[in-house]
Image (cartoon, rainbow, N blue to C red):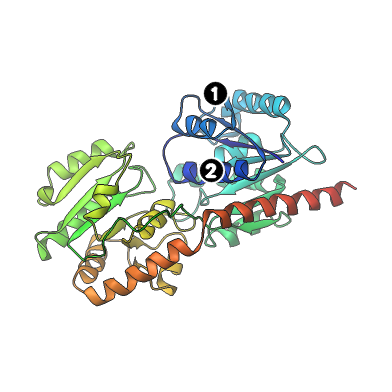
């Protein structure tokens, strides 16, 4: 099968890592893979090194307005005509809007992956105003839609009532023993983009409250993004500045994970369980996260702490409570390791490929 991916940004992030793992798995199964993405990006170089064909998406922008990316649509159409895929798999709302109906049965099918709905609770007003009408115009015209969590499924199904859906949960590679030794200490790590919907400034406010109760508690923040400057300024004025390390983008976090016990993620909205959260759990860290994505899975599987309210006091209470309870920490850690490692990347590649086939079969019947 010939599968072409198109994604708006090739930066380091969860969606990009999800795509890279999927592309690698599809290539290993004998498929042909192409990627249309911003030129010179980390994702483009990584996927190309795996053996995929890459096309430079020179004119794509992050603007979801339909008329903002007419040149990008022409570029994507040209790549599709040149490479002739069986499946065009679109990532991100912008790519979904730009690529909708470029490839259609009987020539091929178009699949859209929604990591989280770009409208609704937790999104910016701009997303809510622009993205909902775009979604109503484009989602019903997809041949198939994948989500990596259940939270957005009802609203997406309501918009695209007659489109096949699949929930394909994230998975991460888990080679070797966990990097964290399992000792409970007053140390946490944040690994995530410093950009909305992540909220590192809220994490700082919460950590200030943690430090008043556990003076030796340390938080290391790894990541880059548009909030980096505001974060640096906020920490420099914080009474807990000696307890917060801003590490920036760290290609290999192994040494930082070894000294941490908790993975902290403060976010306003997510899809399923984020790739960063799963990676941390697979390395033996216990997540403390806000109530986003498939957070209910952490609760039901007793493998993490979900903060009840989105405020610094509630976040601090969750962190301090976990740091003060070694027995609970050991239970959650054992369950976190099991949860993150029992689902493999092969599972999520196979489920995605099976969905391609199911949508293709449905399209053949409809065309006939």
Give x and y (percent) for residue 158. Answer: 65, 59
Residue 276 visible to an observer of this rendering: yes
Disc number placed over residue 59 in the picture, else none: 1
Q: In this view, does 80 lie above or below 326?
A: above
Per the image, label 2 sits on a secondary structure element best described as helix
Residue 268 visible in the current orientation: no
Query: Which of 349 and 245 lies nearest the eye of the viewer?
Result: 349
| Image quarter (top left, top right, bottom left or bottom right) of the N terminus | top right
Q: Residue at x 45, y 69 (%)?
A: 296
| Mark in front: 1 vs 2 | 2
Image mark for residue 343 = none
Q: Residue furthest front?
A: 176
Q: Position of residue 60 (x, y in %)?
A: 54, 28
- On the image, numbered disc 2 is attached to which residue? 19
Q: In terms of depth relative to the viewer, which is nearer, 27 or 158?
A: 27
Residue 265 picture quarter: bottom left
Image coordinates of residue 122 in percent, x first then y, are: 42, 53
Disc 1 on helix, strand or loop? loop
Query: Which residue occupies the foreground of this view, 189 or 95?
Result: 189
Within 10 Å of the Cα at label 2, are there few (<14), some (14-19), or many (20+) other Cα atoms? many
As rendered, which of 147 and 278 lies closer to the eye? 278
- In the rendered structure, the answer to whether residue 317 lies left or right of residue 97 reads left
Can you name the residue that lies furthest to the bottom here? 327
Q: Is 60 situated above or below 140?
A: above
Residue plotted at (73% across, 26% down): 81
């Amino acid at each position: 099968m010939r599968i072409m991916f198109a994604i708006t940004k090739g930066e380091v992030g969860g969606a990009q890592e999800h795509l890279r793992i999927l592309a690698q798995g599809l290539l290993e199964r004998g498929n042909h893979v192409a990627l249309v993405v911003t030129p010179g990006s980390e994702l483009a170089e990584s996927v190309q090194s795996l053996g995929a064909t890459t096309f430079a998406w020179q004119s794509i922008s992050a603007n979801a307005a339909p008329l903002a990316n007419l040149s990008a649509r022409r570029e994507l159409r040209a790549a599709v005509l040149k490479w002739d895929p069986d499946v065009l798999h679109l990532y991100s709302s912008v790519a979904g809007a730009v690529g909708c109906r470029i490839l259609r049965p009987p020539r091929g099918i178009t699949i859209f992956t929604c990591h989280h709905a770009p409208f609704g609770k937790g999104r910016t007003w701009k997303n809510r105003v622009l993205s909902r009408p775009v979604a109503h115009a484009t989602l019903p015209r997809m041949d198939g839609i994948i989500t990596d969590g259940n939270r957005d499924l009802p609203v997406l199904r309501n918009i695209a009532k007659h489109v096949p859906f699949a929930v394909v949960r994230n998975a991460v590679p888990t080679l070797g023993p966990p990097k964290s030794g399992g000792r409970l200490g007053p140390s946490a790590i944040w690994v995530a983009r410093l950009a909305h919907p992540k909220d590192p400034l809220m994490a700082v406010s919460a950590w200030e409250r943690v430090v008043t109760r556990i003076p030796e508690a340390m938080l290391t923040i790894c990541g880059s993004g548009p909030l980096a400057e505001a974060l640096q300024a906020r920490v420099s004025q914080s009474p807990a500045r000696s307890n917060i390390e801003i590490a920036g983008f760290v290609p290999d976090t192994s040494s930082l994970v070894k000294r941490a016990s908790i993975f902290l993620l403060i976010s306003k909205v997510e899809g399923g369980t984020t790739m960063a959260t799963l990676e941390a759990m697979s390395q033996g860290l216990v997540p403390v996260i806000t109530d986003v994505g498939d957070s209910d899975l952490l609760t039901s599987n007793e493998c993490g702490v979900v903060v009840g309210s989105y405020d610094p006091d509630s976040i601090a209470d969750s962190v301090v409570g976990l740091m003060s309870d070694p027995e609970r920490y050991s239970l959650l850690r054992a369950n976190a390791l099991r949860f993150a490692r029992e689902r493999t990347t092969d599972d999520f590649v196979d489920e995605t490929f099976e969905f391609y086939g199911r949508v293709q079969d449905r399209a053949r019947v409809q065309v006939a």
